[in-house]
Image (tube, rainbow, N blue to C red):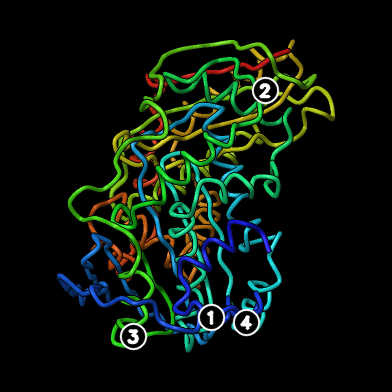
Amino acid sequence: MPALLVAIVMACAATRTPAPAVDAFAETLAEAPSATSARMVTTEHLPEAGLTAWTLSNGATVWVLPRNDRSGRVQVSARRTLDATSVSANDRAAARMAEGVVRGSGLGPFDADAVDRFEATRQASARMSLTDGYANVSAEGPSTDLEAPLALLSLHFRAPRVAPDALRDSLKLARRPIALPELTLLELVQGALWEGVPDEPDATVEPTPQQIEHVLRQTFADAGAFTFFVVGDITPAAAETPVLRWIGDLPGSPRDPITAPLSPAARPVTGPRDTTVHGNPYDDAYVVLRLLGPATRGPKERQEVHALVDALEVRLRYTLPVRTPKEARTPGVGVLFLPAPTAGTEVRVTFRCDAANMDATLAAATRAVEDLRARPVDAQELGRLQAASAARTPKSHIDWMHELRQSVLDDADPASLAEWRAMRALTPERVQGAAERWLDLKTRVVVRAVR
């Protein structure tokens, strides 16, 4: 059994009697922690959105959204907003390695036998991720056994408390999920789009054990800095006892939460700006057109932004020049809702082309943006957008978990979740008004990544 898992089990176990590894682990998760001091400090009900919120004595906030989709499953998530909206290449690599440490110690593709058996028996699973702006742990399990996903989720918060030697011994199980050439390209672009990030990171440098230990301890040591979410076929009354056992018992402080960023807070570069960076490991040029608009508030505005992305992608298909089969690929159009302190909406168009065709392709992409701002969508386009919008209406527990987290953390208005009940249909006027608001070419930033 990996050293980190052993340390966690020893820290959590209710008994000191020696036992086989599998039995000790199963017994640890089956028994309630000694949560004698865990309690609900405040309770809030938002009946219009179907929400219940608790503040626990360790500083954690828990939101419960009952949803009956007949799946018999429940989704659990813990998320905190990081102070840095972008981190350095070394920080990103350390975060990925830290995720591998936790998974390698019993949560993921390198499961120890004990955890593997527990997950199979209880039909539960958990995983951790660190992305720009957020640290997140997600778990799922049967709605009749909320203890199982909560127990697996809690291990991520106990991991930073184990002995440093045990933590470093687990590093050999970590793996990089992204190849170095792709990492280099992504970091080149990210460095040009955000201030404070090096333009030419050394992606070949492996993070040190001290860096990985720092990421785990700085990010997950205090459960009071996290917001927890429970979505599924379960009532608040049924969730209360498991939540107190597994979340209320976690180390945390409502008075002194960890607030230091992983690296100095970065800010998005504002336009108009055109930058060329060198170091792209591929023959094709990689070009990004980024437009930065105001933050969205509520599902209604996010619906409009997603419609813009769909409409822009269609216009690009008929606008971009195609001279070789290699350039026949439709460019990607994506949207990123940036958390505080940046609090903005980023629409990003990315494409690959021959270096000689960069200017023509970029000019065509700019014309597509201008065209969408100036010319309303026609009936055929509107039909496509309405169908795509209907497909995005939350249906599964995972969909509702995503919307709940955005309403609570991004909108700071959990009641906005109720907007889905009275969502209006898209109209040409709404789409064009959104284009004028979120596709502002004055914020245009272009990054060309070449060899």
**Distance of label 2 from label 4 (alpha carbons):** 53 Å
Three-letter code, disc 3: Thr
Q: Which of the labelled discs sits on residue 436, or is there none?
A: none
**Distance of label 3 from label 4 (alpha carbons):** 31 Å
Q: Which of the labelled discs sits on residue 17, or is there none?
A: 1
SS assignment at label 3: loop
**Distance of label 1 from label 4 (alpha carbons):** 11 Å
Q: Earlier in the sequence, mark 2 or mark 4?
A: 4
x then y, percent, for residue 392 = 49, 61
Q: Quadrant of the C terminus?
A: top right
SS assignment at label 2: strand
Tell me which residue sits at (44%, 48%) in the image.
Answer: 135
Q: Earlier in the sequence, mark 1 or mark 3?
A: 1
Q: Earlier in the sequence, mark 3 or mark 2?
A: 3
Nearest to viewer (mark 1 / mark 3)? 1
**Distance of label 3 from label 2 (alpha carbons):** 49 Å
Q: Quadrant of the N terminus?
A: bottom right
Nearest to viewer (mark 1 / mark 4)? 1
